[in-house]
Image: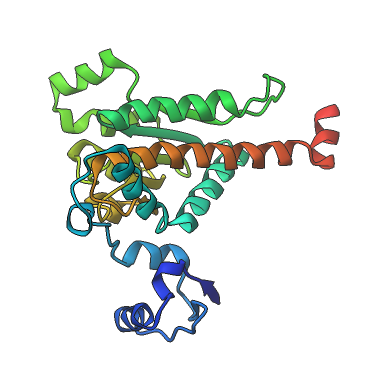
Amino acid sequence: MELQLPTQWWDGAQARTRFQAFFGLALDDQGSVVREGWNLKMLSQALPVQAFDHEGAMKPISDSCGYFEAYHRVLATMPHEWVEQVAAKLFEAYLDSKGVYIFGNGGSAALASHFACDLGKGTCFDGKLRKRLRVMSLTDNLPLLTAWANDTSYECIFAEQLRNLVEPGDLAFAISGSGNSPNVLQGLQAAREAGAYTIGLGGFEGGKMKQLCDSCIVIPSNNMQIIEDFHVSVTHALFTLVCNRIRSWTTAPQVLAAAAR
């Protein structure tokens, strides 16, 4: 089985040497590896993420140009392969009528609502499609959030909601800049126990969340503002990719013929 790995894993002799030492696998100068039983997800989640150290590599950000220079440095190392993998899973959830549950804290809570709105409304194409993407943000029901927080603990607010909703094959999509928020980790664990596919959108080096995710997009930065910038961009990229795939699927001749019957 041949796998094509993210560029930053094999671009340069030093990177290939680190990879070979870590996995004990031979790697050519194009990043291809042949080994039965390995897959891209296993490799991407196992390999440590190297966050860009803005403070160590640059002067303190004191103007707009400095901020966007730091932004550009992160953009150059974005894990695009992982974004594509998550987009494929979201489209698969649409095809299989699986639920997508999104959650996070603070700015990530706001993004969970934003992303759920994009996926739920933006994929309907003027309301003409009978098939819809089943998506829900777990950050929107304030009475329910405060009830669980008050009667149990704040760490349980996502896990307890998921236990009411999630089914095998559904997607649990966690957003956390640090990857270490206890309520996010408990939510992912509850989703795993129910047989859901777990997705993370994080930063720094992924935190504890990375090990609980089947797919995890880690923004390689240690600056929370830049991480959150990229979180919005990644969700917009995911929405665009899923939207275009749904549009292509619904205009396929066989789908149009079935809808006409």
In the shown orientation, is residue 241 left or right of residue 199?
right
Q: Is residue 205 above or below residue 163?
A: below
The answer to which image quadrant residue 21 occupies is bottom left
- Residue 106 in percent (x, y) is at 25, 28
Q: Is residue 152 left or right of residue 230?
A: left
The colour scheme used to paint the residues is: rainbow
**Viewer-closest of 90 and 26:** 26
Evaluate whether residue 163 shows in this view: no
Q: Is residue 73 visible?
A: yes
Task: Find residue 227 and report its horizontal and vertical position in percent.
Answer: 31, 43
- Give percent across and percent down for residue 216: 37, 52
Q: Residue furthest top?
A: 143
- Whether residue 33 sits left or right of residue 193 in the image: it is right
Q: Quadrant of the N terminus?
A: bottom right
Residue at image x 35%, y 44%?
68
All told, the count of numbered labels is: 0
Residue closest to the eye, 27 or 212: 27
- Residue drawn 34% across the image and 40% down it: 174
Q: Left of 202 or right of it: where is 77? A: right
The residue at 28%/62% (across/down) is 50
- Rendering quarter of residue 175: top left
Q: Quadrant of the C terminus?
A: top right
> Up-down: is 69 above or below 39?
above
Image coordinates for residue 11, horizontal then vertical, percent:
43, 75
> Against 91, is 28 above or below?
below
Pick whichever, 23 or 68, lies toward us. Answer: 68
Residue closer to the observer: 11 or 191: 11
Q: Going 57% across and 38% down the picture, which residue do you hit? A: 240
Q: Quadrant of residue 20?
A: bottom left
